[in-house]
Image: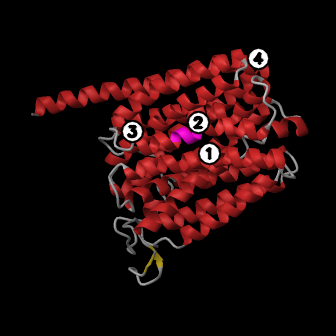
Amino acid sequence: MLSTRLGHAHLGDRGSFFAAASVAALALWASGSPSIVYPVYTSDWGLTASLVTIVFAVYPISLVVTLVVFGSLSDYIGRRATLLIGVALIGAGVLLFAVAPNVVWLMLGRVLQGAGVGFAMGAASAAMVEYNTGSPGRASSVNTAATALGLALATIVGGGLVEYAPFPLHLSYWVLFGIAAVVFVAVWWMPRGLTGAPPRDDAPATRWRPQRVAVPRGLRVVFAVSALAISAGYAMGALLLSLGSQIAQDLIKTDNALVAGVALSISAIVIGVVAILARSLAPRTSIAVGGFSIAAGLGLLVLSAALESLPVFVAASVVAGAGYGWLFLGGLGLISRHAPVHHRASTLSAVYLVAYLAQGVIAVLIGQSATALGLEPALDIWAPVIAAIGLAASGAAIATSIGLRRRQAEAG
């Protein structure tokens, strides 16, 4: 529904909420779009596992740089303007993938994608909190489900197009470019105010300028737990998105891109289901459960490679996906509840900065290990490391929850 509350036609709160959610879905679709095509690049262009993961890692590195410089931008110029910049850059990056003749173009495309998501993710998350008309946990739940939908579409649609349509190196990106154009139009109709609580036309008190990423005082413990939880999920994503389809192809003997895509999408689908079903779960409880689940899922992933078993790989995707869903839902819910409204985007951007930095570093190290030692030994090394990050997030959530209850008891 369109509203004219600010003197011009624009989406209402509900429409703006879902427009922001579509940006989150687009961001993760763009992030995961090359994952199912990596084996084709490997066979057609002769790319090594190390080079593939460097292409993957260019994305979070670009994203981190963008967050450092522009993480607070939407708190000054508004959610809509920042989202438009982000979606435009994502679309430009996808366009480079669609016409790429070599790996240099892929890297340039990943730079633009990373920059676009750096502009978009913090602003989209903040907009969903501010335009939320439902329960307090709805924004985090729908945000998690939207990102899961984006990942699922990246692997399923990409896998089907790579396997059964012409131009396997390019067509899936043209489809995604069309989706990006639709999302851009949806964001264009969002209100032009600074935030969505309620939409405003007033300018911020000070002009925006690049500034260091900072966490408001009093939020550092909450920030640490939230960032650790989301980092654990993103680290697992680095493993599955950069090497997952290659694991399915080389270790589980599945050479059908659609089968590999569906196997990888199971994890994303489970993330979305968890996001909806667990929306009323307390954030720290969600993080505690998620850390243990992601560790179990990574253990099953190692087992699937050792047994060359597709059913065990699917089971790993289910368990790890549930863990990611709980971690992301809990981490996002925890920081969203405590971030001050006029620093919400910058605080959320700081969380994403830590998580994407961890993802980029781990992706490069996984790729170097896979090139030097082989895919299965690299999996044996890095799956336990990522599992340990998940367990650390669980431990931090449990410890802070106990401390919170103790302080409440003393105050009472």
Alpha carbons under labels 1 and 3: distance apart = 25 Å
Could you classify mark 3 by the number of other residues whose Cα lies within 10 Å: few (under 14), some (14-19), or many (20 or more)?
many
Return the x and y of residue 216 as percentages of the image width and height.
Answer: 35, 46
Considering only order in the chain, which callout, 1 or 4, is on the residue closer to the N terminus?
A: 1
Return the x and y of residue 341 as percentages of the image width and height.
Answer: 34, 56
Residue topped by disc 4: 373
Secondary element at tag 4:
helix
Quarter assignment of residue 298: top right
The residue depicted at 38 percent of the width and 74 percent of the height is: 202
Most extreme residue toward the front is 311
Secondary element at tag 2:
helix
Q: Give the number of the disc on residue 267.
A: 2
Range covered by the magenta-colored residues: 267-271
Alpha carbons under labels 4 and 1: distance apart = 29 Å
Residue topped by disc 3: 223
Secondary element at tag 3:
helix
